[in-house]
Image: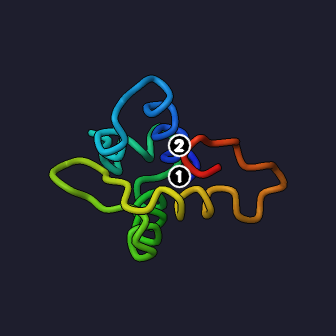
């Protein structure tokens, strides 16, 4: 989930959406669970963990990214792949 949210954010930045606007997604946990192909309960647990880590939050039926750099770190932690080169983080 963290990786998907980061990739959505980076895609929005790459097409010219301002950074502040790119941190808001008009999606909810039900839609996230369907996109990821996991149960709503599992998506809710993952989202709560990300929320407790102060990486994301829910705001007015939207998901807001609070700490993009932290989300990137969590996204690739423990995976055997390289982080994408980003203009934002060098």
User: Mark 1, residues whose alpha carbon is within 10 Å: few (<14), some, or many (≥20)?
Assistant: some
Check residue 36 in the rendering and tell me which mark sits there, or answer none.
2
Residue name at image x 30 percent, y 45 percent: 20
Q: Earlier in the sequence, mark 2 or mark 1?
A: 1
Q: Which quadrant of the structure image shows residue 50?
A: bottom left
Residue 67, x across and y down, in percent: 43, 62
Q: Residue furthest bottom?
A: 52
- Viewer-proximal residue, 37 or 15? 15
Q: Is residue 18 left or right of residue 60?
A: right
Q: Where is residue 55 drawn, in percent x and y?
A: 43, 65
**Residue at point 44% right, 40% down?**
34
Q: Residue at x 50, y 28 (%)?
A: 14
Residue 49 higher or lower than 21, as above or below: below
User: Image check: 50 left or right of 30?
Assistant: right
Q: Are marks 2 and 1 in contact (CB under 8 Å)?
A: yes
Q: Secondary structure at mark 1?
A: loop
Q: Residue at x 58, y 49 (%)?
A: 3
Q: CA distance from mark 2 to mark 1?
A: 7 Å
């Amino acid at each position: 989930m963290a990786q998907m949210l980061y990739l959505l954010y980076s895609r929005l930045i790459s097409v010219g959406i301002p950074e502040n606007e790119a941190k808001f997604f008009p999606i909810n946990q039900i839609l996230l669970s369907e996109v990821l192909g996991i149960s709503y309960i599992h998506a809710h647990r993952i989202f709560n963990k990300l929320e407790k880590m102060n990486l994301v939050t829910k705001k007015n039926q939207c998901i807001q990214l609070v700490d993009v750099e932290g989300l990137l770190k969590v996204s690739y932690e423990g995976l055997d792949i390289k982080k994408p080169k980003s203009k934002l983080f060098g």
